[in-house]
Image (cartoon, grey):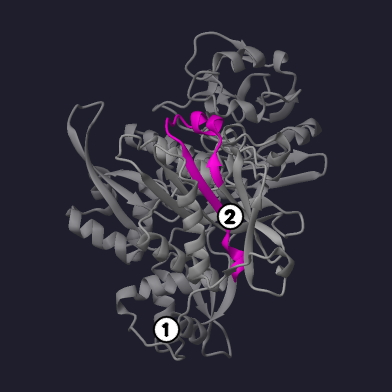
C-alpha cells in the first residue's frame, strides 16, 4: 500500500488542532489507516527541522494521497464538517478537439478548469505531489493515465489533441531554456528522471501532443509539459488535462484532482467543465459520477458480525465515511447510499460493509466463536513435505530456502542443460535484474549458489531444500504447473556418491517404498523403486543414476560435472539429488 509523507505542521493546520503523535496514531487507526513512521527532516526553504508523519493508506483510496484529501476525510469522520457539495460551473466550457490519429497512440483525453485559485508554496507542492502519486498508483507509471496542468492565462482555447511525427513537434520543455523536437527530447531525457516514461511513446511513428488555438504546444503526454504554460505561485486559473488508454481511470484521476484542490478556488468546490469533441460526438468532463444503490442494514450487520443496528444509526456511521444516506420508502431495513466523486473505491455493497465496520469501530465488534466446529488439517502434499523436512534434519542435513526466481544462466548454461530444455521455463516479461529472469525449474542452482556464498564454512556441507518448481504446461488453465521437489547437495573434498545414495535409501525407507532388485518384478502395481544409469549433462559421466518409481523417472542423483562445479565458483566435488515428491501421494 502507498505511504504518504505528511508534515505535522500542515496536518495540524488542516485539522484545526494540535495533535500529539499518539493522538494521530489513534485517529488513523480508527479510520483504517496506519501511522507507519515519524521522521525529522529539514525544511529546504527555512532550514528548520520538521516532523513528518509517514501514513500508510489503502491503494484504492486515491482521495487520501495528499494532506488536503486526508484531513478532509478525517474531519468528516470526526463529524466536524459535512461532505462538500461539488458543483460544475454553468459557464460555456472550453473545448478539446480530438483528432482520430490519437486512437493509435493514446486514445482518450479529459479535462477541467479551476478558476480563481489561490496558491502558496505548500499548496503548490501538494498539487504536484498528488499528480506524481496518481501517476505511480492508478496511472501505472503513466501508461494508463497521465496528468498535465497549465496556467490557463498563458494559453487560449479551443485546444487540439493531435498525433504528429516527432520531428514536427517543437517546443521548450518544462524548466528548459531551448526548444527541442520530439526526437531530440527523447535523446535529451534518456538519462533523466523521465527516462522510465520515454518507452511509452518513443517507438511509435506518431507522438501525442496538445496545442492551443494559437498553435502553442501545451504538453507532450505522457512525458512533459511545455515551459510556456507552467504553473507558478501567481497562477490564478489552472487548465487540467489528462490523457491515457483507460477512460475510467482518467475520470477517476480528474475527479480526484479537482475535488481536492477546488477547495482553494474563490468559490470552493466549483469546477469548470471541459467539452471533449471527437468524431463520434462530444462529452463533458468531469462527470462527477457517483455510486448509488440500496443496501439492507440488517444484512450488513450480519456480515460484520454484530447485532442488527437501526437504520438511523447506520446512516450516521456511513455519513462519517463521506457517504450520503437516505431512507427507502416502505422498507424499514433498507437505505439508499450515494458516494461522492472522491470515493471511487465504492463499487459494491461489500465496500459499504467495510466502511460501516470502520465507523462502528473494529474494537467494538464482539469476539464470537465460529458457529461450526471444524478440525484443521494440512494438505497431503504439505504434510509429506514437512515429514521429509523433519527426517532430513534428523539425518544431519540443513534446510535452506531460496528465491523462486533465478537467472536464465543458472538453469541453463551453468547446469550444462541444452537450449531446448529452456523452452519449458517460465520467463519473466520485464525482469528488473539479471538474477530474476525466469521461474526456477530446478532447486539445484539455488543450493549451489548458497554453497558458493558459504565456502568458508567447515566441510562437509549437507544442504537440502523442499519447495516448488514450475514448468510450462499448455494443458493447464494457467499454462504452467507447479511440482514439489526435494533436492540435496553434499559438498566435501570427495565426490561421496555413496552419501547421496544413502540419503535416497533413507528417504525411501521413511516413505515405506521398497527397493526392487529384480527388474522383472518391477511394474506399476508393485510399490517399489529402482535406480538405473543415466546420461545427464549436469552430472559426471558414469556417476549418474535416475530413480524409477511406478515405471517412470521421478528424479536423478549422482556426482556433479566439474564444469557445473566451476560455473558456480566451487572448488570441491559435489554429489546431488533432486526428486519429484508428488509421485508419493
Circle 1 SS class: loop
Between discs 2 and 1, the one toward the N terminus: 2
**Quadrant that contains the C terminus:** bottom right
Residue 230 coordinates in the image, percent (x, y): 49, 24
For the question of whether residue 322 can be seen, the reply is: yes
- Whether the magenta-drawn stretch holds residue 152 is answered as no
Left or right of 16 in this view: 201? right
Left or right of 1 in this view: 255? right
Q: Quadrant of residue 477?
A: bottom right
Q: Are marks 2 and 1 in contact (CB under 8 Å)?
A: no
Q: Residue furthest front?
A: 518
Query: Please, is residue 174 above or below residue 352 in the view?
Result: above
Query: Please, is residue 42 above or below residue 374 in the view?
Result: above
Check residue 176 in the rendering and tell me which mark sits there, or answer none: none
Q: How many marks?
A: 2
- Tag 1: Cα neighbours inside 10 Å, few (<14), some, or many (≥20)? some
Label 1: which residue? 305
Residue 462 coordinates in the image, percent (x, y): 39, 49
For the question of whether residue 342 can be seen, the reply is: no
Q: Quadrant of residue 564?
A: top right
What is the C-alpha distance between the residues marked 2 and 1?
Answer: 34 Å
Circle 2 SS class: loop
- Tag 2: Cα neighbours inside 10 Å, few (<14), some, or many (≥20)? some
Left or right of 458 in this view: 89? right
Label 2: which residue? 288
Left or right of 272 in this view: 260? left
- Whether the magenta-drawn stretch holds residue 575 is answered as yes
Residue range highlighted in magenta: 558-585
Residue 509 coordinates in the image, percent (x, y): 50, 68
Amino acid at each position: 500500500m502507498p505511504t504518504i509523507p505528511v508534515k505535522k505542521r500542515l496536518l495540524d493546520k488542516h485539522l484545526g488542532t494540535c495533535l500529539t503523535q499518539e493522538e494521530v496514531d489513534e485517529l488513523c487507526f480508527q479510520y483504517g489507516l496506519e501511522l507507519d513512521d515519524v521522521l525529522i527532516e529539514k525544511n529546504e526553504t527555512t532550514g528548520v527541522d520538521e516532523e513528518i508523519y509517514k501514513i500508510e493508506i489503502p491503494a484504492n483510496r486515491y482521495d487520501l494521497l495528499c494532506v488536503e484529501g486526508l484531513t478532509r476525510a478525517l474531519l468528516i469522520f470526526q463529524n466536524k464538517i459535512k461532505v462538500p457539495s461539488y458543483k460544475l460551473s454553468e459557464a460555456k466550457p472550453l473545448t478539446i478537439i480530438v483528432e482520430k490519429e490519437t486512437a493509435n497512440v493514446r486514445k482518450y483525453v479529459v479535462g477541467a478548469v479551476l478558476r480563481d485559485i489561490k496558491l502558496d508554496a505548500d499548496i503548490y507542492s501538494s498539487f504536484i505531489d498528488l499528480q506524481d502519486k496518481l501517476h505511480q498508483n492508478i496511472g501505472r507509471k503513466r501508461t494508463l493515465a497521465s496528468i498535465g496542468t497549465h496556467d490557463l492565462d498563458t494559453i487560449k482555447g479551443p485546444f487540439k489533441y493531435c498525433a504528429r511525427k516527432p520531428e514536427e513537434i517543437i517546443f521548450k520543455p518544462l524548466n528548459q531554456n531551448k526548444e527541442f523536437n520530439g526526437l531530440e527530447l527523447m535523446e535529451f531525457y534518456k538519462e533523466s528522471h523521465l527516462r522510465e516514461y520515454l518507452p511509452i511513446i518513443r517507438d511509435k511513428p506518431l507522438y501525442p501532443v496538445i496545442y492551443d488555438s494559437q498553435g502553442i504546444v501545451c504538453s507532450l503526454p505522457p512525458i512533459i509539459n511545455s515551459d510556456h504554460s507552467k504553473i507558478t505561485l501567481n497562477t490564478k486559473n489552472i487548465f487540467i488535462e489528462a490523457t491515457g488508454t483507460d477512460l475510467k481511470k482518467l475520470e477517476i484521476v480528474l475527479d480526484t484532482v479537482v475535488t481536492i484542490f477546488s477547495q482553494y478556488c474563490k468559490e470552493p468546490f466549483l469546477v469548470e467543465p471541459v467539452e471533449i469533441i471527437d468524431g463520434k460526438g462530444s462529452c463533458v468532463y468531469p462527470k462527477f459520477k457517483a455510486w448509488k444503490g440500496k443496501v439492507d442494514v440488517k444484512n450488513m450487520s450480519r456480515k460484520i458480525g454484530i447485532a442488527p443496528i437501526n437504520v438511523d444509526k447506520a446512516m450516521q456511521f456511513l455519513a462519517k465515511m463521506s457517504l450520503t444516506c437516505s431512507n427507502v420508502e416502505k422498507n424499514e431495513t433498507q437505505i439508499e447510499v450515494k458516494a461522492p466523486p472522491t470515493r471511487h473505491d465504492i463499487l459494491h455493497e461489500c465496500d459499504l460493509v467495510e466502511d460501516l465496520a470502520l465507523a462502528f469501530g473494529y474494537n467494538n465488534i464482539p469476539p464470537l466463536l465460529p458457529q461450526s466446529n471444524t478440525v484443521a488439517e494440512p494438505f497431503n502434499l504439505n504434510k509429506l513435505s514437512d515429514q521429509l523436512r523433519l527426517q532430513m534434519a534428523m539425518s544431519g542435513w540443513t534446510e535452506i530456502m531460496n528465491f523462486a526466481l533465478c537467472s536464465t544462466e543458472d538453469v541453463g548454461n551453468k547446469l550444462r542443460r541444452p537450449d531446448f530444455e529452456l523452452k519449458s521455463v517460465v520467463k519473466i516479461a520485464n525482469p528488473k535484474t539479471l538474477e530474476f529472469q525466469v521461474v526456477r525449474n530446478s532447486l539445484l542452482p539455488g543450493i549451489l549458489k548458497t554453497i558458493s556464498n558459504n565456502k568458508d564454512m567447515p566441510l562437509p556441507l549437507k544442504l537440502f531444500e523442499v519447495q516448488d518448481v514450475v514448468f510450462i504446461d499448455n494443458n493447464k488453465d494457467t499454462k504452467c504447473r507447479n511440482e514439489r521437489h526435494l533436492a540435496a547437495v553434499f559438498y566435501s573434498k570427495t565426490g561421496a556418491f555413496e552419501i547421496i545414495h544413502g540419503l535416497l535409501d533413507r528417504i525411501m525407507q521413511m516413505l515405506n517404498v521398497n527397493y526392487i532388485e529384480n527388474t522383472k518384478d518391477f511394474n506399476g502395481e508393485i510399490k517399489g523403486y529402482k535406480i538405473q544409469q543415466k546420461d545427464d549433462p549436469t552430472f559426471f559421466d558414469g556417476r549418474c543414476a535416475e530413480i524409477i518409481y511406478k515405471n517412470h523417472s521421478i528424479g536423478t542423483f549422482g556426482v556433479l560435472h566439474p564444469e557445473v562445479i566451476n560455473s558456480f565458483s566451487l572448488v570441491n566435488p559435489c554429489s546431488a539429488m533432486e526428486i519429484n515428491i508428488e509421485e508419493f501421494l
